Image (cartoon, grey):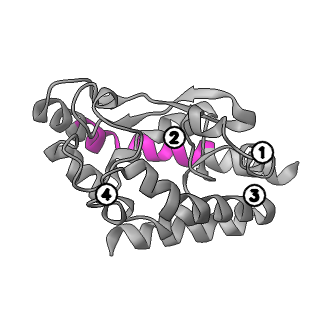
Amino acid sequence: MISAILKRLFDLTASIIGLTLLLPIFAILALAVKLDSPGPVFYRGLRAGLFGKAFRIFKYRTMVLDAHKLGGPSSSADDPRITRMGAFLRRYKLDELPQLLNVLKGEMSLVGPRPEVVEEVLLYTAEEKGLLEVRPGITDWASILFRNEGEILRGSSDPHAAYREKIRPEKIRLGLEYVRRRSFMTDFKIILKTLKAIVE
């Protein structure tokens, strides 16, 4: 109970500081997204959160308008739906920064299993539903391991099928491992390794 309170206090403090310090960068990126292609600045896809409660995620839009009508939920690095600015944002994970707003609202944590679309969560096995016992996060072990997910799926005729075969099993395993062994020190290690992976 105490560890959960400390984690929430850390998330709240970090999100407030992050949003304040990064405000100028947020504004520049928002303008770049808007000027690069028609459509909204943010992508607000529906995701399953703590205990399966649905929420709308904040991400900078990296695809063309109505991309969901042109393809599936997974995308490769060579997906034609990705905009020029979107490719840049994805490369450096900058499209994920607005999720600090989700952390501030209590819908996400800095660290935790990445949130899945509701349709995928409805297919979870009894064991996989254990992922819903914690708030989803901006980063986790799987985010680091599969930081080049788009490249892994590059050239796939069906990126979502390739995702389910090449990425999903290990992503689920790592997520469940995190839920079982979560701690403040584990979160700190994941944050440091994530920052290292981004700058490499």
- State the residue at coordinates (62%, 45%): 136
The image's mark for residue 156 is: 4
Report the span colored magenta.
Answer: 12-27
First of labels 2, 4 by sequence position: 2
Label whose residue precedes the other's in the sequence (1 or 2) = 2
Between the residue at mark 1 and the residue at mark 4, the CA separation in whole angstroms equals 33 Å
Residue 17 is covered by the magenta coloring:
yes
Query: Quadrant location of residue 120?
Result: top right
- Separation of residues labelled 1 and 3 (CA atoms): 7 Å
Viewer-side label of 2, 4: 4
Q: Residue at x 47, y 40 (%)?
A: 99
- The residue carrying mark 3 is 179
Q: Nearer the viewer, mark 3 or mark 4?
A: 4
Instruction: Answer with mark 3 or mark 4, whichever residue precedes in sequence.
Output: 4
Q: What SS does tag 2 mark?
A: helix
**What element does badge 4 sit on?**
loop
What whole-number distance in Å separates the C-alpha atoms at marks 1 and 2? 24 Å
Q: Does residue 84 appear left or right of residue 45 in this picture?
A: left
Q: Which residue is located at x 56 percent, y 42 percent? A: 116
Question: Magenta: predominant secondary structure element?
Answer: helix
Q: Relative to 54, is 25 on the left or the right?
A: left
Name the mark nearer the viewer: 1 or 2. Answer: 1
Asked whether the beta carbons under mark 1 and mark 3 sit within 8 Å of each other, the answer is yes
Query: Is there CB contact under 8 Å for labels 1 and 2?
Result: no
